[in-house]
Structures are given as C-alpha cells and as structure tokens.
Image (tube, rainbow, N blue to C red):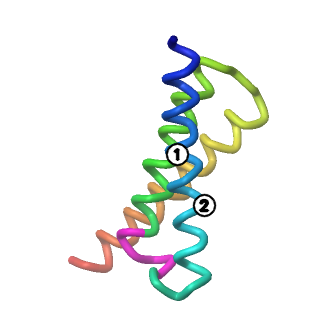
Amino acid sequence: MLNLIADIIGMAGTSLVVGAFFLLQLNKVSPKGLVYNLMNLVGALFLLFSLCINFNLASFVIEIFWIAASLIGLYNYKKNKV
C-alpha cells in the first residue's frame, strides 16, 4: 500500500514538473515567476518523497539539485519583489 501511495505522489510530482515546463514553453509562465518555481519545488519534493520509498540514487540526486534551483528561483523572486 505504501508503494502505491508513493507512486501516486511521485506521479503528481512528475505532472507538476512537466506541467511547469510546458507552461514555460507556451509562454504562460515566466522562468523567474512564482508559479513556475513553486510548481518545480513542489513537484521535486513530491518526487523526492516517492524516491525515499522506491530509492534510485541518480533520480534522488537530480531532485536535490532541482529543489536547490527552485529555492534559488524563489529567493530571487522574493528579493526582486521587495
């Protein structure tokens, strides 16, 4: 049952990350905007959770970097809004 929940959360994370990329390509969001960076952050966190149940080192490492990049984007967004 836990594997199923992890897979569902992981698929939700994948949907968020891929959805953010599609919105970016369609010029619906800005790469420096709040929506894009939040979608990437939440998506990466969901994927990281999934990877804690069904571990894969390469995917785990890329999600850590994806989270870091999203946090940098959110920091820059906040810094430029003040």
**Residue, x 46% and y 52% (percent of image)?**
41
Q: Tell me the amino acid under the disc marked 1.
A: Gly
Q: What's the residue at 52%, 76% (across, down)?
A: 23
Q: Which residue is mark 2?
A: 18
Picture disc at residue 47: none
Left or right: residue 73 compared with residue 19: left
Q: Nearer the viewer, residue 34 or 4?
A: 4
Specify the farthest residue to the right: 58
Q: Report the magenta residues as a range.
A: 30-35
Queried whether the magenta region covers residue 31, the answer comes back as yes
Residue drawn at x 70%, y 37% is: 61
Image coordinates of residue 56 in percent, x first then y, are 75, 26
Residue at image location 25% in from the left, 79% down from the top? 81
Q: CA distance from mark 1 to mark 2?
A: 9 Å
Assess disc 1: are there few (<14), some (14-19) or many (≥20) residues with their C-alpha within 10 Å of its C-alpha: many
Determine the main secondary structure of the stretch shown in magenta.
loop
Residue 17 drawn above or below residue 27: above
Under circle 2, the secondary element is helix
Q: Position of residue 74 (x, y in %)?
A: 39, 63
Q: Identify residue for label 1.
A: 13
| Amino acid carrying mark 2 in the image | Val
For the C terminus, give its image quadrant. Answer: bottom left
What is the crowding at mark 2: few (fewer than 14 residues within 10 Å), some, or many (at least 20)?
Answer: some
Please check the rendered image and state whether residue 13 is part of the magenta-colored stretch, yes or no.
Answer: no
Residue 49 location (% of width, % of height): 51, 28
**In the picture, residue 75 is in which quadrant?**
bottom left
Q: Residue 13: where, in percent of width, then height?
A: 52, 45
Is residue 36 depicted above or below 40 in this figure?
below
Please indicate whether residue 66 sits to the left or right of residue 59 in the image. Answer: left
